[in-house]
Amino acid sequence: MHLDLNLLTALDALLEEGSVAGAAARTHVTPPAMSRSLGRIRKATGDEILVRSGHTMVPTPYALAVREQVHALVRQAHEVLSPERPMDLSTLDRVFTVRWHDALAETCGPALLASVHRQAPRVRLRLVAESGSDTPDLRRGEVDLESGTGTPASPDVRHRLIGEDRLVAAVRPGHPLTAGPLTAERYAAAEHVTVSRRGRLRDPVDDVLAGLGLERGVVAAAPTAATALRLACDTDLVVTVPEASTRAARLHLGLTALPMPVELPPIPLYLAWHQRHDNDRAHTWLREQAETALRTLFTPGSEPAR
């Protein structure tokens, strides 16, 4: 029996993407070509692999059972065909895409860029804005690294805890809330601006206040922390933001940070990447540079180098 090892690569992409179109985009072939590969895989395995369920495709029990084995085989094949070679950072010519929210990019971006450029002057970085989606760009290879506060839902996305942040209430100097102890009642009675890419006027802080029988007055939503902090700078609005990741921006604007008057869980910060990069030494190097830049946020008395 003739075995076409290209079908393993196609099967790996189909099982990770869950669609013909997604697998085609990931492997840089046309959807009709991927559809033909799926047909050949079905014939070779005697299994449908992906079946329609409503408007989506779902893997069969057989597909779920072999997914990890298929991915391991594809990874091993790449390792065999790509023998270990010394990596010369001085000649490394590559573009990496890093997705961080605006506060992280502003605070840690300069340190990451300086470190990368110093060691690998031909490497270029694309710092792109946060997305509301759940890491599909990592899976498709459109983003190399991203950071977020939640663990990825996709099992093929690796993640590492960098540190834990806490919320503070940022206000202009001389704001009424700076006079006297900040109570939950005084905090709720003030006018607030939320940070939401989707314009949401409610976040988990409101749920905590509701448990105390309080409701805060949210009068605006801003798409980024930078915008919200700028609004707080010129008004009596209160913006509740992570302390570490917005520290540089708050200091630059001269804003005052007040400790929250209610108990809130810490905010984790994760670094995430797709498992296909586990054995990519250039990507591993990039992860190390990004982790070093991000960890300075949680080092007492330390500020990211600029």
Image (cartoon, rainbow, N blue to C red):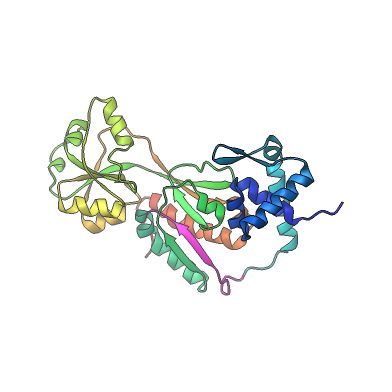
Question: Outermost residue toward the right?
Answer: 1
Give the quadrant of residue 193. top left
Residue 76 at x, y percent in the picture: 73, 54
Q: Is residue 148 magenta?
A: no
- The tally of labels here is 0
Q: Is residue 96 magenta?
A: yes
Residue 266 at x, y percent in the picture: 38, 38
Residue 258 at x, y percent in the picture: 23, 43
Residue 238 at x, y percent in the picture: 21, 44
Location of the C terminus (image quadrant): bottom left
Left or right relative to 56: residue 299: left
Residue shown at 61%/47% (left/top)?
A: 16
Of residues 129 and 12, which is closer to you in this image?
12
Residue shown at 38%/55% (left/top)?
A: 104
Left or right relative to 92: residue 184: left
Left or right relative to 124: residue 84: right
User: What segment carries the magenta color?
Assistant: 88-101
Of residues 205 and 301, which is closer to you in this image?
205
Looking at the magenta stretch, what is its main secondary structure? loop
